[in-house]
Amino acid sequence: MVKIGTLNLNDFPVILAPLEDITDPPFRRLCKTMGADLMFTEFISSDGLIRDAIKSTRKLDFDDMERPIGIQIFGSEVDPMREATFVAESVSPDLIDLNFGCPVRKVAGKGGGAGLLKDIPKMIEITQAVVKATNLPVTVKTRLGWDEDSKFIVEIAERLQDVGIKAITIHGRTRAQMYKGEADWTLIGEVKNNPRMNIPVFGNGDIDSPQKALEMKNRFGVDGIMIGRAVIGNPTIFRSVKHFLQTGILLPEPSVQERVSLCRTHLEQSIEWKGSHVGMVEMRKHYSGYFKGVKDFKPIKMKLLTILDTNELFDLLHHIENVYI
């Protein structure tokens, strides 16, 4: 059993990464039904929470069936992060996660997310303040370093543990790499195998198949894995990975009918959650995943990406379901 503070998880948990405009409640619910052991909200701006900005506070919403769930916050200053922790704690999540890994310019360029990899003392100060501000377990998600010349994650992980975090997830790239090239898990393994570390260490980066999940588990000894981009439009990856880890047997690919069923449920809940227009538009990010590998699908995919009427969209899904039998 893997423990994050007082929170008990399965042996070798398979975790859903927080992804902006992806891991909203409708999608998280699907991932949970497919076996995700731990999930996180989309990352939430500490400044937005303090200002009571609608976009930020709405991201605090979750259903009890999604538990265990963490609320992930980001920011560049101590006081706003501490105050945002109080707000996040008020909705009773299972843990608070600190984003020290987001590489996008609008976050990292302002000193938040991966930007704190250029200011380790402030990262530690923020973490210590948040740990002291809550009784919930505090975890961190970060990267190897800012660039190739500053991959200090082994030392950083020790210092974060020393100020009280209960688990760390490490993405195997630097901020400079963004999402390019291959994730390097070597340093993730060094963190895990550092005798000073006694908290769970989770690995993240390029886990896109059950075989890759098992390889990373065996090679680097991590306590669990976090799946990010490979989950988009592909919630069944949790079922596939967990079955393979437990049995060594690969499940068959989901049928087109099952994919349509999942996609339809996702679309219905997305529309209910966000309204018709936004719900339809934001679903477009998922269609490539739901229908990956379906033969001669490109013309239908173009329709999925351009239809503006909800009835037409559901009719098209029904058509897909019946054509690809």
Image: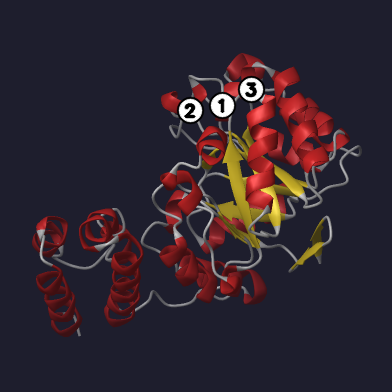
Q: Earlier in the sequence, mark 2 or mark 3?
A: 2
The circle on residue 117 is 3
On the picture, is 37 further left or further right than 262?
Answer: right
Which picture quadrant has residue 231? bottom left
Residue at the image point whose x is 83% and y is 42% from the top: 193
Question: Would residue 117 be found to the left or right of residue 189 on screen?
Answer: left
Disc 1 vs disc 2: Cβ atoms closer than 8 Å? yes
Say what secondary structure mark 3 lies in. Answer: helix
Closest to the observer, 297 or 14: 14
- Res 107 label: 2
Q: For the residue marked with disc 2, what is the amino acid?
A: Val
**Quick one: 303 or 136, which is closer to the camera?**
136
Q: Tell me the residue that label 1 is attached to.
A: 112
Q: Residues within 10 Å of mark 3 (few under 14, many from 20)?
A: many
Amino acid bearing label 3: Leu
Identify the mark at residue 85; answer none if there is no mark.
none
Q: In the visual, does 288 lie left or right of 43? A: left
Q: Earlier in the sequence, mark 1 or mark 3?
A: 1
Residue 262 placement (x, y as % from top left): 35, 75
Please name the residue shown 83% across and 32% down the image: 158
Q: Residue furthest front?
A: 51
